[in-house]
Image (tube, grey):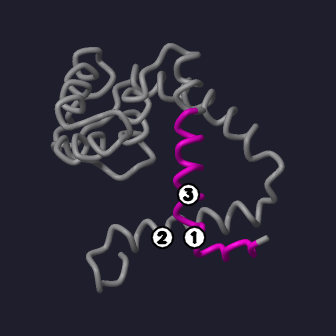
Amino acid sequence: MPDTPPARAVFGMTLAFAERALTKRLHETLVGVQTAPSTWYTLQLTAPTRPAIAPDALREDLAGAPSLDADAARAAIDGFVADGLIRVDEDGNVVQTADGEALHAKLRATVLGRTDDLLGPVPPDDLETTVRVLRDVTARAESPAGTPPR
């Protein structure tokens, strides 16, 4: 029987399977509250606790989300503006309206409840290490080759 490969050898595949399983669980949770993933992603990206985001940056971020492309992202944003969930403020950034903030709070409570169910048995120190490592790997992956992460 071959030895188990070191963590570095299985990191990418493990991360891919985790992302797939978590995305499926998120989508199931959102279906349960009759919400499209694009609504959740948009509300997450425009949350008042996040840095300001311009409309073009929001479209780009949404287009990178599972099951969305540039045209779907543009249509989604237009729909959220029409539905009164987001607007462009005086500085040219996309912000949530009061209705958007209320919907986001409701959805966030539901999603965090499911997240707590999944993470319940994970020791807090392990979770903090995992988040730190994933943030570092993400920054390195997003940096041009040969440059240090931001």
Q: Are marks 2 and 1 in contact (CB under 8 Å)?
A: yes
Instruction: Determine the residue positioned at 60% across, 32% down.
Output: 25
Q: Residues within 10 Å of mark 1 (few under 14, many from 20)?
A: few
Query: Disc 1 marks which residue?
Result: 133
> Helix or strand or loop: what does disc 1 sit on?
helix
- The numbered mark at residue 44 is none
Left or right, 56 with respect to 143, comes to left
Q: Position of residue 120 (x, y in %)?
A: 80, 45
Query: Disc 3 marks which residue?
Result: 15
Say what amino acid the circle numbered 1 marks.
Answer: Val
Q: Residue furthest front?
A: 1
Magenta span: predominant SS is helix
22 drawn magenta: yes
Figure quadrant of residue 39: top left
Q: CA distance from mark 3 to mark 1?
A: 12 Å
Residue extent of the magenta highlight: 2-24
Query: Disc 2 marks which residue?
Result: 137
Say what amino acid the circle numbered 3 marks.
Answer: Leu
Say what amino acid the circle numbered 2 marks.
Answer: Val
Q: Are marks 3 and 1 in contact (CB under 8 Å)?
A: no
Q: Residues within 10 Å of mark 2 (few under 14, many from 20)?
A: few
Q: Is residue 103 above or below residue 7?
A: above
> Helix or strand or loop: what does disc 2 sit on?
helix
Q: Residues within 10 Å of mark 3 (few under 14, many from 20)?
A: few
Q: On the rendered image, what quadrant is the N terminus found in?
A: bottom right
Q: CA distance from mark 2 to mark 3?
A: 11 Å
Instruction: Determine the residue positioned at 16% across, 39% down.
Output: 90
Identify the mark nearer the N-term, 3 or 1. Answer: 3
Q: Nearer the viewer, residue 144 or 123?
A: 144
